[in-house]
Amino acid sequence: MTKTKTTRYDVAEHLRTPEEMAAYLEACIEEADGDAAFVAKALGDIARAKGMAQVARDAGLSRESLYKALSGDRSPGFDTILKVIGALGLELHAGAARA
């Protein structure tokens, strides 16, 4: 009997286009149920897909502080979220809540 070898799934390996990244972030925001750390982790996944060092430079943050902010262990400040979203080439939109 042969053993099945599994590897850990990393969503960052599958986020290739800006459209895929935006769709992933939108889905995570919908599923977050108010959990800011969950959304931060999703941004971290997207940042890893784009290259954390480049995103950090574009956001004006150190790579280390970006890793900490987007680890999912904490809720980063809104200013950090806005910087990262801009550095990722994404936009933040608002819409009316669904009833």
Image (spheres, helix red, strand yellow):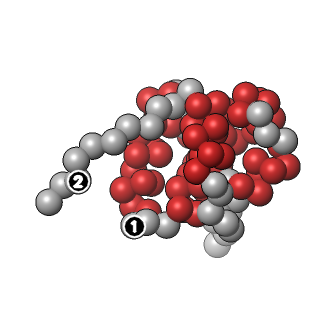
Coordinates of residue 88 in the picture (x, y in percent): 60, 32
Choose top left, top right, bottom left or bottom right for residue 32: bottom left
Q: Can residue 30 be seen in this view?
A: yes
Residue located at (71% from left, 34% from top):
59
Q: Name the residue under label 1.
A: 33
Q: Earlier in the sequence, mark 2 or mark 1?
A: 1
In the image: residue 25, left or right of residue 68: left
Coordinates of residue 70 in the picture (x, y in percent): 68, 54
Of the 4 image quadrants, the one containing the C terminus is bottom left
Count neighbours of disc 2 (C-alpha within 10 A) and say few if under 14, some if 14 to 19, many if 20 or more: few
In the image: residue 17, left or right of residue 48: left
Q: Which of 96 and 40 is in front in this view?
A: 96
Compared with 98, 12 (above or below) is above
Distance (Cα) linking label 2 and label 1: 13 Å
Q: Nearer the viewer, residue 44 or 11?
A: 44
Count neighbours of disc 1 (C-alpha within 10 A) and say few if under 14, some if 14 to 19, many if 20 or more: few
Query: In the displayed image of the protein, which residue is found farthest to the bottom?
Result: 1
Q: Name the residue under label 2.
A: 97
